[in-house]
Image (cartoon, rainbow, N blue to C red):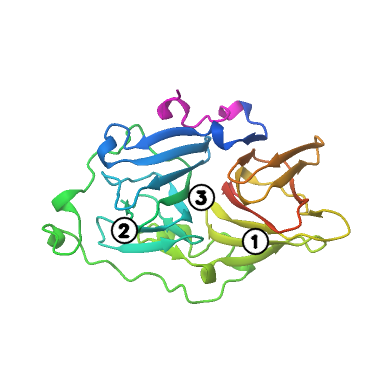
Amino acid sequence: MTNIMDVLGRYPFPPDKKEPVIIRKDEFVDFIYPPDNPFTSDLSRLIVSTDKLLLGTYQLAPGGSFDPPDIHPGDEVYYILDGTVTQQNQVSGQFIQASKGESLWLPREAWHKAYNFGDEIVRILFFIAPKPWDEHIPPPDFPTGDEMKMYKGMSNDKYDNASPMADLSRQGTTDDIGQWPIEGPEGRKPPYPFYRITEERKLLNVHGWRNPMLMKIFVSNDLLHMGEFILPAGGTGPRTSEPDSHEGDCALFVVKGPITVNLPETKEAFIVEVEDAMFIPEGVPYQLINFNAHSVKAIFSIAPGL
């Protein structure tokens, strides 16, 4: 059995020994948050944790919530795999919901707590960069109970009024890569508002003009980048993306597959099944190949640079 604290920052490899590898779903590291209170915990699975990023999943049963609230020294992005999550900012009093296929951006230093008010399990793919926690899980001095800003909250008067959120109605372009849905430093100003990225608010782009692959970007800023790679079927041979590499570590989580990941430099190929992951270290070129009769999709999580 693996203790989460023993592998943070070095799973599947320590920083000086990274190499491309498939992480099968039966190799994920299971843990609960908070680790010392099962009565108010969520079920979490660690997929990747390096010195640059952490990727995992967590789930809440119907009617459940995790407590105490959490906070990170890095940005966090959700991709909702199942259900509808209700997310609370205990200091600003903001409540926001996201459903299957949508995303949430929780900026660095934002207190947050998740609820499941639905009738099905909520399951979330979460991505944090550059690091998830300092030395404490959960962090100390969290606002909870009567200290939370909410309907008829007993401590509401001690908090400032929340400032207006940025307008997300504009249409994005290629120039917005690196500052979507807004610039990172701007989004990290108090009271640290959450941003919901619906299907319509994903930033669309295309990788490769000879062999185009659709990209739908949820969040792209100075700390991290998360979104979808969608590779269609069909062509004179298997549909293949153009080679790419990144200025940071990359983790791919397959939601529609299988996807074959090809490494042009080493001539290695990896078949990544649905809900398995592929870790690709900084600077390693790779391609996605679709040998199926249907489109395939992987959620990409990259930090710090594309």
Q: CA distance from mark 1 to mark 3?
A: 19 Å
Disc 1 versus disc 2: nearer the observer: 2
Sequence-first disc among 1 and 2: 2
Q: Residue extending furthest left?
A: 154
Looking at numbered disc 1 in the image, what kind of residue is underneath it? Answer: Met
Is 15 colored magenta in this rendering? Answer: yes
Observer-nearest residue: 201 or 292?
A: 292
Which residue appears at 45% of the width and 23% of the height?
Answer: 1
Seen at 29% across and 63% down, the residue is 94
Secondary-structure class at tag 3: loop
Q: Quick check: 12 left or right of 63?
A: right
Judged from the image, the secondary structure of the residue bearing numbered disc 2 is loop
Give the numbered dot on residue 117: 2
Q: Is 87 or 137 nearer to us in this picture?
A: 87
| Residue 306 appears in view | no
- Who's the residue at 35% across and 63% down the image? 96
Task: Determine crowd level at label 2: few under 14, some 14-19, many 20+ residues with C-alpha closer than 10 A.
Answer: some
Residue type pointed to by label 2 = Phe
| Boundaries of the magenta span | 1-16
Above or below for 126 versus 104: above
Q: Main secondary structure of the magenta part?
A: loop
Is the residue under label 2 in contact with that under label 3 (CB below 8 Å)?
Answer: no
Q: Position of residue 291 (x, y in %)?
A: 78, 51
Q: Is residue 63 above or below residue 6?
A: below
Q: Quadrant of residue 203?
A: bottom right
Q: Badge 3, how many Cα within 10 Å: few under 14, some, many 20+?
A: many
